[in-house]
Image: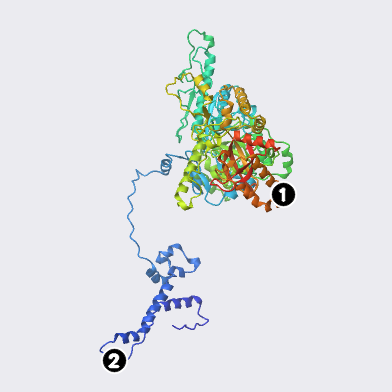
Amino acid sequence: MSKRPHSPDVSGKQRKRVRLLDARTISVQSPSTSNLPTSIDVEQFTISRSFEISALQTAIASSSAASTTRAFQSVPRHLRRRAASHDVRRLPQRLRERARIEMDTAKPKKGKLPKAGKSRQLTRTENFAKRQRDKAWLETHLYHAKRFHMSTLYGYRLPITPTQKSYRPSLRAARSGSIVHDYSYWSTLELRGREDVLRKVLERVVAPVGVGGGGPGAKECREGARVWEGAAYECGMWPRGAIGPVWVLWRPLTGNDPERQLWIRVHPACFAQFLGSLQCACGQVLDERRTLAFPSATPVIPGAPLPLLNTAVPASFPPTTTQSASTTGSTAPISQPPQPTHGHPATHTHPVDEIQITDLRTQLLAFNILGPKSTALLAGVLQLVKGQNQNKEVWDTIGQLGGAGVPRGMCLALEAWDPRLSYPPKLAHANPTTSNHAATRTPLPSPSLAQSQLWEPSARQPPAASKRELDARRSFDLVPGRKLRPGTGDAKVPVLLVQRSVASRLASPSHAQGQEESLHGWTILLPQGWGMPFLLSLVAPTTPLAGQREIQAQAFELSNPFFPKDWVGTHAGVKEWRGWEEEEKKGWERRPRGKRVGEEGWWSADWRRVLRSSGAGGDVQGEQGIQGEAGMGETIVTQREDADMEVEADPATTLAQETAETEVLAPWVLRLPSLSTLVQSLVRCPPGPGAGLVLHSHLSALRSQRGLPDSLPSGDLLLQSALVHVRLVPCGRGCPAELTPIYRLSPAEAALWRTALSRSASDRLQETNELIRLGATPPLQKDLIGYVTSGGFSLYRGSAHGLASVALSKLIQVGREEVAVGEAFRWLVKFSHRTGGICWPATLELVI
């Protein structure tokens, strides 16, 4: 087939059409004019028709090649539509016939099932409520579900991480911009009662010292000017029996009312456990006061758990309605106060104290905004109502300082208009003419600044106006895009701002010198129903949203233990690691046998082996040591008791037997602000029972200051079962990961590592083989001192590090060996990958 010469007047589109038509044309030979023969010779006939046969084969090949371009693709790109691929009528007239041939035969559609009648159809609200039977949604669930990977955690459907790449941008926003996280899934409990009664209850269920120093009964916290952040414990079990993080907020004093009110916010993973501890503490405190008022009543054994006759708040989830109840002593009915016994005069009678617990999980919302631009973001979103002159002046001053210039935990009550009236908000910018003067007028926490209507249930009302009504008001405005003016019928939202800081918890000297970074921002508390209006305004200036992975990354970058993953020794932490172990086990079993890395069981931490070997007190535990699955704060009997032995039923005797030498304690983490000083004093103690006695006396003194009985086990048992949080910093190469084992060094091995690490950087590069040779020595299992719970590469530092939990007794041994050679608590150790490999040197830093 010869090429046709083309003239310059013919366009490329016409030439393409001619080429396609030529590809679909079969060339034939003109018939001969001679007469047809009476018979046909097949061979001669095939030879004579070879041209037609070859032309047919060529046409088939060219036609199949031309069919790769379909009819709808012949249309210019700017005129193409998706529907043109299946709708012939959307193509030009000249291409419709060809498109009909190219289209596949339509498959018959299956008949749909008949829909339910209108009387049986569920509304949108009913359908959403049906999907929340086994879990609860946040008010911002639909917004997050379209942009995040969602998962069911702690009874909620929570966002895990955005669908787009956000790990580095989220950390960058928290460091130089602002980032928002919906904290509404944290549970809130409200307590009402006399101040002295509430303080005694808190002393039994929370740590004596919080993050910022002082306890929940400190003056500034008790007056309601600051929020107290700390850890919760089982009733009367401190320092053992940790539950999880909590923060306590007192309502500022109003008049001479003796009744006080406070909020306790707790992580949902430990809500049920904390509620049981709180109820137990309320029962014990009220029974003790009842015993003092009526001495002839049944005595109360200090430290013994007392059952309650009523349940103030249901521990099941999800909550349907907010319930409240009064909690009185466990030996008297709820509705009637205990009456004095016979033989006592009426002068001993006085009103019995009462504690009321209310569940506010469905009535309060919270957003956490972190970053240097968080204050400017809130200043643009919150349009304050005129009337709070003092609070407005303080807020204007804070706008010039930022979140970092405000005292930690400071509370500020404001009243703002509906944020939808001023949507979209604009970021507020600092005024350079007043920034220098504002630095000298740093606001201090004050109860008058924390007075908020948010404490009143009548003020916690959802929005009254719908979005349609607000849009109708905007339609009457002649200038499009202009903000609406607040009117008398518009809603006023009471908000409570709490300064929040995510800072490093290191107890090392470098932290004291301010070398560690911190993130500052605000936590805004809102009434129910205002989640979406405020969220849309907060993210309008392109503010990124954070999920569970992002807030965990923030804690990891700042060396802050993240709950529940890094809280070893709590029920929530054990449950978290069990889920992680199941996922790792399934992934390991799915791999072929030849591609499995590590031995079976490497995905679980063997805390029994960590705490089993000799401790600082010189005692050696048996093979039946600590079990990681045991209940936290309970004792585990290592020897079988004689079945015929008679045991007294006296609770005091049972409590004293907890410190028997045949028992060991479950792992517990020591958390103290003075942890560094305490550990150094334990290191300087001579080998033997001296370290255990020092630890026991120090903890007993703190318990006696809080009015708790001296029911601690012996010092050796406490020391052998204690863990401490540390940060692992590699000295060079190596990147720790989850469950990376940490080993101590023998004196000879430590000397070799110190010699290799003391060289300069250039010499160390030349001696890489020596470091590898030192790390190639397989570690001994008896030298295992702990595991890394969170590890990886830190983007803030530009190097790897990890958060770990190590045995206190073995850490003391490492410190004693370093003091013997003149080292000043460097805590030099080595670590390897969880599946084995070369060990690398690292140093430890205590985390309080």
Which residue shows up at 70% across the image and 36% down it?
A: 442
The residue singled out by tag 2 in the image is 35
Furthest residue in direction bottom, as rendered: 34
Helix, strand or loop under label 2: loop
Count up the numbered dots. Answer: 2
Which residue does the numbered mark 1 point to in the structure image? Answer: 760
Q: Is residue 404 left or right of residue 326?
A: right
Residue 298, position as x, y percentages in the image: 49, 15
Of the pair 216 and 603, the residue shown nearer to us? 603
Q: Label 2: how many residues lie within 10 Å, few (<14), some (14-19) or many (20+)?
A: few
Identify residue type, mark 2. Answer: Asn
Q: Is residue 729 visible?
A: yes
Q: Is residue 684 above or below residue 21?
A: above
| Residue mark closest to the camera, 1 vs 2 | 1
Residue 369 rendering spot, x and y as whole percentages = 60, 42
Check disc 1 and report its element: helix, strand or loop.
loop
Write down the quadrant of residue 93 in the picture.
bottom left
First-in-chain label (1 vs 2): 2
